[in-house]
Amino acid sequence: MTEMDDLTPPYLRIVAELRRRITEGELSPGDRVPSTRQIVREWGVAMATASRALTALRQESLVRAVPGVGMVVTGAEPATPGRGARSDVRRVPMQGLSRDQVVRAAMGIADAEGLPALSMRRIATELDVPTMSLYRQVRGKEQLLLLMADAAFAAHRLPHTLPPGWRAQLETLCRLQWSIYRRHPWLAQVISLTRPLMAPHAVAHTESALRALAGHGLDQHTQLHLVAALANHVRGTAVNLEREAEAEQDTGLTDDEWMTAQADVLSGLFAAGEFPHLSRLTRSPVDLNVESLFEFGLQRLLDGAAALIGR
């Protein structure tokens, strides 16, 4: 990455590096630049930071949005339509193919392009092996998704020691889960609360949450429903991560830019006076996003748990 002062905002560091790749020819006109998800993965930043970096490049006219493709370097049309090709998965000989390589390749595709892009044929193409060779390692897509989910949780293991107090322990677990969903936006589409995946590293989170509530006077029904409600809040909020990334990739607009573009529509909607409370909010807008929803909902659920335990 281009060297900059440590005080330089992260998004400007990303802008500088991508600008260098473009000006030095590593990325040619028509090439697709890294998506927000790829930037999150490569630089370890938040989705909002990745979006801000791409917006800055677009304002410099170095990149432009192509509907259905995403951001490409200004110039020629991309040679092949699609959500972007990946070349960071190492090609492997068929004889040396392992289950871990299959899972890692699948996660790389899902991280960069979402679950709709994931198929056994696509994974085989990434690994440069025959499609049927994958079935020696996984029975099919259902087992593959289970292995992917387990690997995602395994990469962010539970801390050996949790902070004292049931509330601090549950909050730690929820924040860890949130960071996993942020790292792998597709994961929220895979996880189910009523038909849970039997992924050992995910089940460990449920066990740890139940352990935090043990001995506080709650019956088993209440304990399980409370743990499920917390997990569902994290997962339910995280469902929006992939959809927002897809919308931004398809339109080339961040959430703030999209709202600005809808200003005339909103003005017309509120002009008739049918929505006075919403109309007042537009005069002094509240910053509502997935992060604020996660924080607000988490604290209110923990407040509710405190009330139950206090009884």
Image: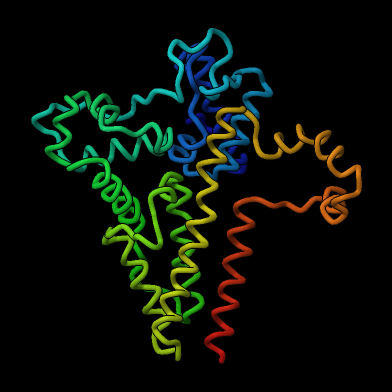
61 sits left or right of 110 in the view: right
* 29 vs 68, nearest the viewer: 68
Residue at screen point 58% across, 13% down: 74
**Which percent across, then down, holds residue 272?**
91, 44
Question: Looking at the image, how many numbered discs can be counted on the residues?
Answer: 0
Q: Is residue 123 above or below residue 294?
A: above
Image quadrant in which the C terminus is located: bottom right
Say whether residue 169 is visible.
no
Q: In this view, does 194 lie above or below 166?
A: above
Residue at screen point 84% across, 41% down: 269
**Which percent across, then down, holds residue 252?**
61, 27
* 88 vs 4, nearest the viewer: 88
**Which percent across, then down, holds residue 27?**
47, 16
155 sits left or right of 10 in the view: left
223 sits left or right of 252 in the view: left
Q: Is residue 120 above or below residue 19?
A: below
Instruction: Please identify the quarter of the rendering in which residue 156 is found.
Output: bottom left
Residue at screen point 55% across, 47% down: 240
